[in-house]
Image (cartoon, rainbow, N blue to C red):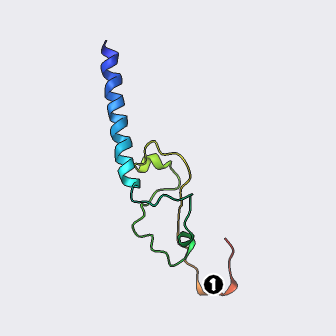
């Protein structure tokens, strides 16, 4: 009845969201979770999306994607901090 139409609309919306997310991640290589260069300070991550770490990644458009993700950040040290050394 009426509910069937609403259910079908939700299914179509979900399928469209899954397809859009699939297109967004298709550019990433198929690997077992990491590539050694990702941990290098000189790695160019400029084409990576920015995702707030205080929210689930679904809020950044990655609907229906569960698993592990790489996050990168930069830390700027003062000259004194750099001289003293730091451990993260």
Residue drawn at 57 percent across, 70 percent down:
36
Image-based side of 31 in relation to 84, left or right = left
Within 10 Å of the Cα at label 1, are there few (<14), some (14-19), or many (20+) other Cα atoms? few
Q: How many marks?
A: 1
Residue at left offset 42%, top offset 64%: 48
Residue at (53, 62) in percent of width and height: 71
Which quarter of the picture shows residue 18?
Answer: top left
**Rendering quarter of residue 16:** top left
Percent across and percent down for residue 52 are 48, 56
Q: Position of residue 59 (x, y in %)?
A: 43, 47
Badge 1 is on which residue? 82
Among all residues in the image, which is located at the extreme top?
A: 1
- What residue appears at the point 48 percent right and 58 percent down from the top-left corner? 30
- Secondary structure under the numbered disc 1 in the rendered image: helix
Q: Nearer the viewer, residue 38 or 79?
A: 38
Measured along the vertical axis of the image, is residue 47 above or below residue 20?
below
* Above or below for 72 versus 53: below
Relative to 42, is 80 on the left or the right?
right
Quarter holding the N terminus? top left
Quarter where residue 13 is shown: top left
Q: Nearer the viewer, residue 34 or 6?
A: 34
Q: Is residue 80 above or below residue 65?
A: below
Q: From the image, which quarter does the C terminus lie in? A: bottom right
Residue 65 drawn at (x, y percent): 48, 45
């Amino acid at each position: 009845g009426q509910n069937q139409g609403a259910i079908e609309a939700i299914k179509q919306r979900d399928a469209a969201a899954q397809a859009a997310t699939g297109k967004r991640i298709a550019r990433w290589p198929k690997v077992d979770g990491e590539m050694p260069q990702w941990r290098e300070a000189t790695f160019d991550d400029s084409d990576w999306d920015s995702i707030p770490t205080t929210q689930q990644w679904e809020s950044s458009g990655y609907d229906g994607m569960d698993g592990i993700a790489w996050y990168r950040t930069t830390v700027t040290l003062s000259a004194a901090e750099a001289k003293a050394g730091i451990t993260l």
